Structures are given as C-alpha cells and as structure tokens.
Image (tube, rainbow, N blue to C red):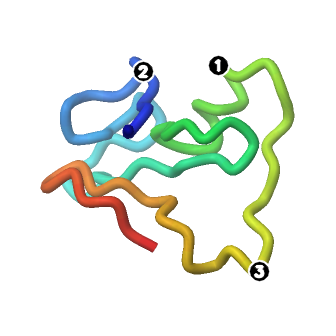
C-alpha cells in the first residue's frame, strides 16, 4: 500500500516544489511515507529523517505523480 501525505496535490506537487516538472514524491526510510519533499517531511513528521542505506539503493522510494508508479 502506498502511503502519501495530504500536503501534496494529485500529481505529488507540494508548496515548496510545484512547477510542471515537479511530479515526484519521496518515500522516507524512517516512516515509510511519501512526502512531496524534504521540507514537507521536516514540517509534518515528528522525527528526524533517516537516509536510505546504500545496500537498499534498489528500494522503491520515488512515486511518479503522473502515472503513480513506484520507482527505484
């Protein structure tokens, strides 16, 4: 199941990044939730972000706002 925060529009744009090409959301390792950007996580989460480790480089952590595919 894909868990996305409510602070993004239907194409995953947030108030920080909202141009025509800003159509990805980022899954944060610490909470397994997609946020529009790092700033959104800082404003909305109650914890510090955790960076994906190199050995999990192939994890699906990007969500395309155009087709909703999860990407590595």
In the picture, residue 11 is in which quadrant? top left
Q: Is mark 2 on a helix, strand or loop?
A: loop
For mark 2, what is the residue?
A: 7
Residue situated furthest right in the rendering: 48
Mark 2 to mark 3: distance in Å? 28 Å
Residue density around tag 3, few if under 14, some if 14–19, many if 20 or more, within 10 Å: few
Q: Is mark 1 on a helix, strand or loop?
A: helix
Image quadrant occupied by the N terminus: top left
At x 85% / y 35%, what residue is drawn?
48
| Side of 37 relative to 42 (left or right) | left
The image position of residue 6, as x and y in percent, is 40, 18
For mark 3, what is the residue?
A: 54
The image position of residue 62, as x and y in percent, is 44, 60
For mark 1, what is the residue?
A: 44
At x 21% / y 51%, what residue is drawn?
68
Compare marks 3 and 1 and give the one earlier in the sequence. Answer: 1
Q: Given contact means CB atoms under 8 Å apart, are the residues at marks 1 and 2 in contact?
A: yes
Which dot marks residue 20?
none
Compare marks 2 and 3 and give the one earlier in the sequence. Answer: 2
Tag nearer the camera, 2 or 3: 3
Q: Is mark 3 on a helix, strand or loop?
A: helix
Compare marks 1 and 2 and give the one earlier in the sequence. Answer: 2
């Amino acid at each position: 199941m894909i868990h996305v925060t409510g602070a993004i529009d239907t194409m995953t744009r947030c108030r920080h990044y909202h141009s025509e090409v800003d159509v990805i959301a980022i899954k944060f390792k610490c909470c397994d939730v997609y946020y529009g950007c790092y700033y959104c996580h800082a404003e909305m989460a109650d914890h510090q972000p955790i960076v994906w480790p190199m050995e999990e480089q192939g994890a699906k952590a990007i969500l395309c706002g155009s087709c909703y595919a999860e990407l590595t």
